[in-house]
Image (tube, rainbow, N blue to C red):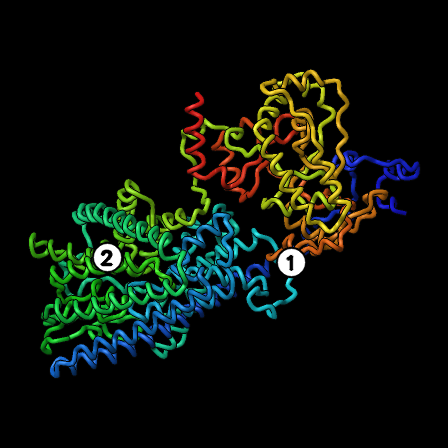
Amino acid sequence: MACCGNCFCCQCCCREGETRTPEELTILGEIRDEEDEILPRKDYEKARKYEAIRWMMMFAIGVTVGLVGLFVDFFVHLFTKIKFTVVGDSVEKCSDKGCLPLSLLELLAFNMTFIFIASVLVLIEPVAAGSGIPEIKSYLNGVKIPGIVRLRTFLCKAAGVLFSVAGGLFVGKEGPMIHSGAIVGAGLPQFESITFKRIKFDFPYFRSDRDKRDFVSAGAAAGVAAAFGAPIGGMLFSLEEGSSFWNQALTWKVLFCSMSATFTLNFFRSGINFSKWGSFQLPGLLNFGEFKCPDGDTNCHLWTAVDLAFFVLMGVVGGLLGALFNCMNRKLAKYRIRHIHPKAKFIRVLESLLVSMVTTVVIFAASILLGECRDLSSPTTHNTTLSGSEDINSTIRRFFCTNKTYNDMATLFFNPQEAAIHQLFHQDGTFSPMTLSVFFLLYFLLACWTYGVSVPSGLFVPSLLCGAAFGRLVSNILKVKLGMDIYSGTFALIGAAAFLGGVVRMTISLTVILIESTNEITYGLPIMITLMVAKWTGDFFNKGIYDIHIQLRGVPLLEWETEIEMDKLTASDIMEPNLTYVYPHTRVQSLVSILRTTVYHAFPVVTENRQNEQDFMKGNILVSNNIHFKKSSVMSRAGEQRRRCQSMKSYPSSELRNVCDEQNAAVEPAEEGEDLLQQMLERRYAPYPNLYPDQSPSEEWTMEERFRPLTFHGLILRSQLVNLLIRGVCYAENQSSATQPRLSYAEMTEDYPRYPDIHDLDLTLLNPRMIVDVTPYMNSCPYTVSPNTRISQVFNLFRTMGLRHLPVVNAVGEIVGIITRHNLTQEFLVAKLRQHYITI
């Protein structure tokens, strides 16, 4: 009865009572009916339904991200307005009474309270610190960072950024919006939460890593779109900075998601701020406003061809300043990693409070002591609308100045950062060169110090504001010293683009984001030229700020392509030859040992290649390469076996302990200096050792046993092996593999994305002598490469197809190594190339 589901030849074997060896039960010998397949075939009848649900999820993600942006913007605006209203009134009253220290204490109380709350939220979920862009970039590149897309991270991030921005730190809310959008994209289509166990619905769709990465890409793009009102820029951001692979169908879906986020936020903000529901007047959290010349001024031009030369020079200076910013921040980050992070967690809170206190004192002192009273004789007559219903002149500060003048330093420091950017872009009143220089220097240093503290923080707005001050300073010099008739707002915008481009080193997406934020297509050429020059200049010294922080975390990020000289290497030069493998039919005790003593995420499924034994002994060049590859793995395999034996000692089965003890029997070592291959050739006629499924590579094996060719049949994941063990999918030694229970695809992916761990397995419920047939569940046709494949081909295949493991298989189908992400990182390739030159 156990053979009814098998083919005709299997039925004959079963009737005759013959016992098949495990090698005969490989995938090459199994012929299965379509109805017995584990992985589902594509059901074209349900394809339209599946696609419709995917579009609905994209729309839901966009709407949710827009509502999150509305929530963040509303409370940041509320808290900031309360703080500046109270402190501003106090300063106005105390300017005559001489109680300015009381105003400073009020400002310190507001800021440090807000920052304390933000720091505590980061203690709850440390991954919520920073902007989150390096982590999301790593995730979309194919590297999973624990906790990066959890609901708890989202709550701490969204709530923490409110208090970080309202607390007066030089941070922005746009970067955390990107992270928040990515979390929404990862969690919403799953309909379940790890943080809150009760949130779990039976939703059978999108149960794969590829689907999840697609939704995270869409969520990150929606975050950019909500932050800047730039849906196209958001889509390009996910393409340029995030995903390691992209498909044409995803482009349209991501753009639709970004549009949904933009117009959701625009609809509600326009209705709340202007009481005109459906007017769509505020597209993003940060809107640069409309750049145009005053009415009636025919000699005014936003920019001319002559200005392009100055824009190029500003791009060079912006790249240099960005490189200096990144270098200083890198040193600060390394100092934090070495001296602050290893200490108690409250030390991080104290650092955040220290940064807040210093920033508050600098803002207050600079506004009171260093500001100049500037004339406001020519009020702004165009583009006076800010993000809300306020007029741009309503945000000027008159601290210690008469009614017809304003304090230019206080106008920049005692306002939300978005209002300060609007002042630099559109205020017709002048800012003194000294004020702009001091503001730029203080903002540069404090923003560099702030980025990296344990609070949710973004870098876009501080970089834009710092660069806008630099651009406005250049325009003042050109106007006063050279007497040029230029539009100051354009130079402020180009300065902002130059500095931001020098810091983050983005080109395509940042160009489109700035164009969409200004709503002026004529700025496309100068912005693009400035960003390209800033990137080239900065890249001469160091990497972008996000890549630096990714490198400090040790994340194996893959670049877009390899250098040309890397083609001097082949797959055999970079692969990992020390393989940990399983057999198509393996005993439970061996699987448990492998899973408990290794951390690999996938294992090759192999059998010994007895048919090629003669070629193997004759030293065939293809197989001799295989011998060469495996020679270096002898000691490591022996060490691996020792680790497995230690693990099996704790297995609750005396039989398993006896097996381990038998493997530790002493064997006389070979004579020192004797050629290994010569020993194998001398023993070519010796009978091939019988290998049972419970045996693993042992240090007691002969050289022939160690270097036996391994025929490659497929890959199986760690999560699949653990799932099979937990569900008891195995069969007895005296039975056929047909008696093994079968799991459907839905059952195999039921626990996605949190599969059980091997340590969750109750070993007392398992019979270690049972055998697991892994062939129905393995990937029998993964991507493979030849040992002689060039690195550029290996890299392109690995990156574009989103692989995690790439087996290296020779011409006779024998696996000789495996390539993972670590083997393709720039540092690893450079080390191997250096080793290659030394060998030559």
Secondary structure under tag 1 reads loop
- How far, Cα to Cα, is label 1 from label 2? 48 Å
Residue found 40% across the figure and 33% down from its top: 563
Secondary structure under tag 2 reads helix
Q: Which residue is mark 1?
A: 751
Residue closer to the observer: 104 or 717: 104
Q: Which residue is mark 2?
A: 444
Residue 594 image point, x, y percent: 65, 43
Relative to 582, residue 440 above or below: below
- Amino acid marked by disc 1: Asp
The quadrant of the rendering that contains the C terminus is top left
* Horizontal side, residue 158 vs residue 187: left or right: left
Residue found 19% across the figure and 47% down from its top: 305
Q: Quadrant of residue 460?
A: bottom left
- Amino acid marked by disc 2: Phe
Residue closer to the observer: 506 or 139: 139
- Crowd band around label 1 with a 10 angstrom C-alpha radius: few (<14), some (14–19), many (20+): few
Residue closer to the observer: 838 or 483: 838
Residue found 12% across the figure and 69% down from its top: 369
**Is residue 281 visible from the viewing direction of this image?**
no
Residue 776 image point, x, y percent: 73, 44
- Crowd band around label 2 with a 10 angstrom C-alpha radius: few (<14), some (14–19), many (20+): many
Residue 782 image point, x, y percent: 62, 39
Residue 263 image point, x, y percent: 42, 67
Considering only order in the chain, which callout, 2 or 1, is on the residue closer to the N terminus? 2
Confirm or deny contact between disc 1 and disc 2 (CB under 8 A): no
